[in-house]
Amino acid sequence: MSHRDTPLTLLGDLTPAEFMAEYWQQKPLLIRGAMPDFLCPIEADELAGLACEEGVEARLVEENGPDGPWQVSHGPFDEATFERLPERDWTLLVQAVDHYVPSVAALLDEFDFVPRWRLDDIMISYAPPGGSVGPHVDQYDVFLLQAAGQRRWQLGGETPEDAPIIDGIDLKILETFEVEADSDWVLEPGDMLYLPPGWAHHGVSETDECMTISVGFRAPSADEAVTSYADYLGEQLPSSLRYSDAAMTPADAPGEIDDDALARMRQLIIDTLDNPAQLSQWFGRVMTQPKYVDQLIPFDPPLDEASLAQKLEQTPLHPAPGSRFAWRRDGDTTTLFADGEGYACSAELAQRLCNSRLIHADLLEDFPDAKALLTHLVNAGSLNFPLDDEAD
Ligand code: SIN
Ligand code: CO
C-alpha cells in the first residue's frame, strides 16, 4: 500500500502527493536511480519467446525494413524473423508482459499510488543500437523505466493531437520534432522518465540489448465514455420512458422544432444520464474490462460452492493474469468489480480481494458472503487455482 506523504526513491524523493500535485498529467519528470541496483525482471530471449507466442500482442519496427522505411510487422514472429534482422535500427515491442511474467507484474506494486484501474499494461521493448519507434506523441501517461542497456530520450514539448505526421507508414511519427532545452538524457538501468499524455518524445537505443519497460496508464476518452455509458443505461431503460409533451402549445408551423420541444428532450436526456448509482455501476464495469477478453478462462465445468470450499482447503486462489479488480462503496452498498462484472459484497471483502495476491480458505471463515462470491469469480475466470491443480 502506498503512503501518500512518504518520499519515494521511485519518484526522486518526492512523495506521491507531491508527484500528483506537480507532475502527474502535467509535465515530465526524469528520475535518476528510481530503482537503484535494478535487475531486469525478464531476459531478452524470454521477451523474444513471448513475441513468438499466439495471442501475445507484439510488433517489430524496422527503420529500414525490407519493404520500406519504418516497416511495422505484427506477431507472432518466428526464429527466422529474428535471424534476418540487421545489426541495428529496429525495435521489438511486446504488450502486456505483466500478464505473462509474474516478476514483471510485481513491478506494479511500486506504482500503487495510482489507482490500479488506471493501468493499461506493461509494455517492454528490446532494441539493438539505433532502434527507435521515431518521435511521437502518446495519449497515455507512462513511466519509462530503463531496464537494460542505455536509451537516449529527447522530449519535444506539449504537442497537439493533430500535429502533422509522416504519411504512408504504419507508425504515427511526427513530421517535425524539435528537442526542447534540457530535455535530452541518456537513461541507465534503474533510471525512469515519467511522461504525461500529449508530450512528444523520441527514445533511441544507444547500446546492444537496450530494454525499456513502459508502465502505461489509460484514461477513457469522452467519446468512448459517452457511447459506452449510453449503451449501458439504454439496456436498462423501459421503452415506456419517452419524450413526452402533455399540455404543449398547439403547433403554429407544423414543420418547426421549437425551443420547448428541444428543452423537453434535453431534460429527458439529463434526467436519464444524471444517475449516480448507475454511473458508478457502469464505471466500475468499464474500467475493469480485461484488455484481452479471451485471456480469461471460465472454470469448466462450473464449480458449486461446496466444491469451491473443498478445493480452497487444498490450494489457494490467485487473480487470473491480466484480470482487473476494483471496488466502490455507494452508501451502504459496496460493489466488487472484476473483469467487467459487478458483485455486491461487504466493503471489507471487496478490499481483501483487491489487495490479495493469494486467497486462502480462511477468507471463507472471515466473510460469510465469500463462498458464493469466490465461486462466481472462479467460474467467470477472474480467479484461478494454480495451473497444475486445474489439470487434475
Ligand atoms: C520504446 O520503448 O522503444 C518506445 C516507448 C515509447 O516511446 O512509448
Ligand atoms: Co511513446
Image (tube, grey):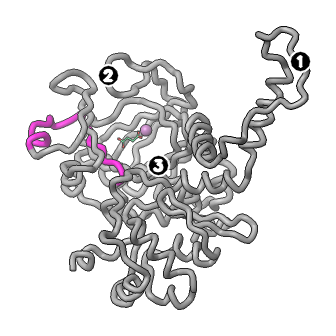
Q: Position of residue 240 (x, y in %)?
A: 70, 41
Question: Looking at the picture, does residue 62 appear above or below residue 356?
Answer: above
Q: Amino acid at mark 1?
A: Pro
For the point 34% across and 34% down, the residue is 133
Magenta range is: 80-96
For the point 49% across and 34% down, the residue is 155
Q: Quadrant of residue 254?
A: top right
* Ligand 1 location (quadrant): top left
Q: Nearer the viewer, residue 200 or 164?
A: 164
Q: Nearer the viewer, residue 386 or 167?
A: 386
Label 3 CB sits under 8 Å from any ligand 1 atom: yes
Residue wearing tag 2: 169
> Residue 216 — which label?
3
Left or right: 309, with 297 as reference point: right
Question: Looking at the picture, does residue 342 appear above or below residue 84?
Answer: below
For the point 54% across and 27% down, the residue is 161
Q: Is residue 238 visible?
A: yes
Q: Quadrant of the N terminus?
A: bottom right
In front of the other: label 3 or label 1?
Answer: 1
Q: Position of residue 381 (x, y in %)?
A: 38, 66
Q: Position of residue 244 (x, y in %)?
A: 79, 32
Residue wearing tag 1: 250
For the point 26% across and 50% down, the residue is 55
* Label 2 crowd (10 A; few <14 / some 14-19 / many >=20): few
Query: What is the spatial separation of the Cα atoms under label 3 and label 2, in whole angstroms?
Result: 24 Å
> Residue 326 — which label?
none
Considering only order in the chain, which callout, 2 or 3, is on the residue closer to the N terminus? 2
Q: Quadrant of the C terminus?
A: bottom left
Q: Are marks 3 and 1 in contact (CB under 8 Å)?
A: no
Query: What is the spatial separation of the Cα atoms under label 2 and label 1, in whole angstroms?
Result: 59 Å
